[in-house]
Image (cartoon, rainbow, N blue to C red):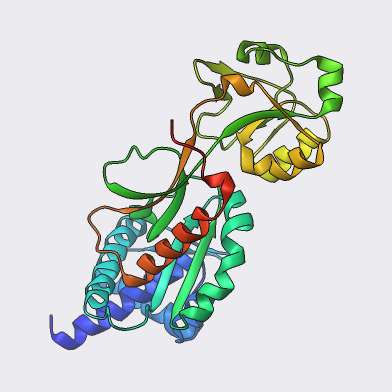
Amino acid sequence: MNQEFNMDLFLLMTCFARAVETGSFSAAGRDLGLGQPNVSRHVAALEDHLQARLLHRTTRKLALTPEGERYYTEVRRILDAVDESESSFKDNLDPSGLLRVACPTALAHVFVLPHVPAFLERYPRLTLDLQINDRYVNLVDEGADLAIRIGNLDDSALRARRIGMFERVCVASKAYLAKRGIPVTPDDLRRQDCVVYTLLSSGANWRFRDSEVTVSGRFRANSPEAVRASLIAGLGIGYGPKWLFEDALQKGELQLLLTEHAAPPVPIQLVYVANRLLPKRAIVFMDLITEVFSRIPAFNAPIE
């Protein structure tokens, strides 16, 4: 395979990866400055070269075939390796390129997004793709550079920088407690209506200092904001990070419960793939978020 074709193959791989990550040929074309027809043609040429269908094309979206899923994982590793190799020789230059960061919904809206404008203004050659959701993002398979994670790190393929610690608390409205009574021990929660956040890693199992209680209730939600609103409305007892309820607690809309049974503080961490060389754009983002979170009282709970 000659050098010119190798360069062409790199372009085809880049077009394929951006089409997967943006969800369409049009978006990938805008992102790469090539236009939709060129991206579509390049991906078709890549499929022809590999003699394999990589994408299912519909009028609404692109979807990876099983062969495409396997190939995308390898392509993303190749593109990241090239990018990281270039970055290692450009430490004297401003960070540049595309930075992908996965972040939980509530943290993103309240604590990260307010700092994005200043971050992008400071680094004009950098593009930030902030992937806001509460599902677990596999950094290796999905091509993200960093993820902000709540909880302890269990994956040996990842490394982490701790950026904060916070308390998890039980809360409810005074109106609900007036009707149903105040729980005295965690076990009392089994006889209460509890609002369950369905994306919590432990599910309906709420952890306390010396026990874990399986709760139930008539309302469940996959949004932290929906859980908070339902608690203020008196639908039950809730469990989550204290910072999520801070404003409602200060206003008297919610009150703390079972404080003497609270579990140890939970870490917030920036995680990245252990065997990858972090590009400078990732390092400056990590430094920013570390500094921002260090100034937030809710993320500086004492380590027990």
Compare residues 75 and 161 and report the one nearer the observer.
161
Residue 202, horizontal then vertical, whole percent = 51, 29
- Please give left or right for residue 280 compared with residue 107 in the image: left
Toward the left, the furthest residue is 1
Residue 55, horizontal then vertical, whole percent = 42, 63
Residue 182, horizontal then vertical, whole percent = 76, 16
Q: Residue at x 43, y 80 (%)?
A: 39
Q: Residue at x 34, y 37 (%)?
A: 154
**In the rendered view, would you say 255 is above or below 101?**
above
Residue 180 visible (yes or no): yes
Tell me how many marks there are: 0
Residue 100, horizontal then vertical, whole percent = 44, 64
Q: Residue at x 29, y 64 (%)?
A: 278
Residue 63 visible (yes or no): no
Q: Residue at x 81, y 21 (%)?
A: 177
- Please give left or right for residue 254 compared with residue 133 in the image: right
Q: Quadrant of the N terminus?
A: bottom left
**In the rendered view, would you say 123 is above or below 180?**
below
- Please give left or right for residue 190 compared with residue 47 in the image: right
Q: Quadrant of the C terminus?
A: top left
Compare residues 227 and 183 and report the one nearer the observer.
183
**In the rendered view, would you say 22 is above or below 108?**
below
**In the rendered view, would you say 34 is above or below 236?**
below
